[in-house]
Image (cartoon, grey):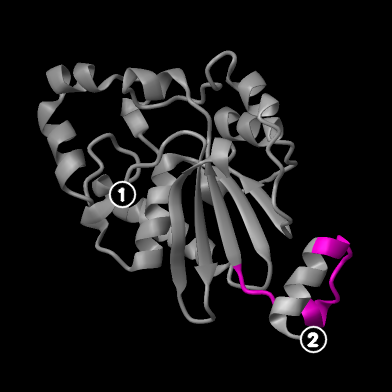
Amino acid sequence: MSRQELCRWYSVSGGALESKELKALPARITFISHAATLALRRASFPLDEPVVEGELEKIAAIGWVAPRAQHVWAGPEQRTQQTAKALGLAPSVAAELADVDYGAWRGKEIDELQASDPEGLAAWLTDVDAAPHGGESLVQLIARVGLWMENQTGAGHTIAVTHPAVIRAAILCSLQAPPSSFWRIEIAPLSVTDLRFNGRLWTTRSTGCSLYHS
């Protein structure tokens, strides 16, 4: 049975694959960015806040059907767990998919920091090694996500409901792009990013696709 035939059989039959057949499937990660929160709308550094009221009902109403996957993960925060469950998923928690640790800046708005700590904010936006908030730098985030991706290179499909920052980091790892490119990637709420593993490297197949049209 060819790989193409095997994949077609699996998608149609719904049956469980034997371990030998499962190894024939390429590794894939489907990242889904969590639904909108007040922090996103207010341009503030998030706490562990829930998604905006009414968003969960909208997600459920679109009738999204999850692709077949061997693993489903989500970050530990409310907003990722809520989004996953609204999509009909039952995720396991992956600490590696948590949002950036913003330290002392959690809950603060950009305008507030511009007034109280302009040098720290400027460092955060221009130096990927900087952690003026006492939390996690972007370089540390990228390393954390890259290590998690290395552990997903086995056969099968993984769905991960997580944060825009985590998905940006995953794309950088896939492209082997410099960390300074972090701010040049936009990830909207409820968007889908698809990565594939070719046996040697992760590749970015698509990103920024709206969940409402996937």
Question: Which numbered disc, 1 or 2, marks the residue closer to the eye?
Answer: 2
Horizontal side of residue 98 vs 83, given as left or right: left
Marks 1 and 2 close (CB-CB < 8 Å): no
User: Which element type, helix, strand or loop, lies under badge 1?
Assistant: helix
Residue 40, given in percent of the width and then of the height, sits at 39, 25
Horizontal side of residue 92 vs 124, given as left or right: right
Residue 112: image tag: none
Q: Is residue 157 above or below residue 167?
A: below
Residue 5, given in percent of the width and then of the height, sits at 76, 78
- Magenta span contains residue 19: yes
Cα–Cα gap, marks 1 and 2: 44 Å
Q: Residue at x 59, y 28 (%)?
A: 78
Residue 138: image tag: 1
Q: Residues within 10 Å of mark 2 (few under 14, many from 20)?
A: few
Horizontal side of residue 122 vs 13, given as left or right: left
Q: Quadrant of the C terminus?
A: top right
Kindly identify which residue carries mark 2: 1
Q: Amino acid at mark 2?
A: Met
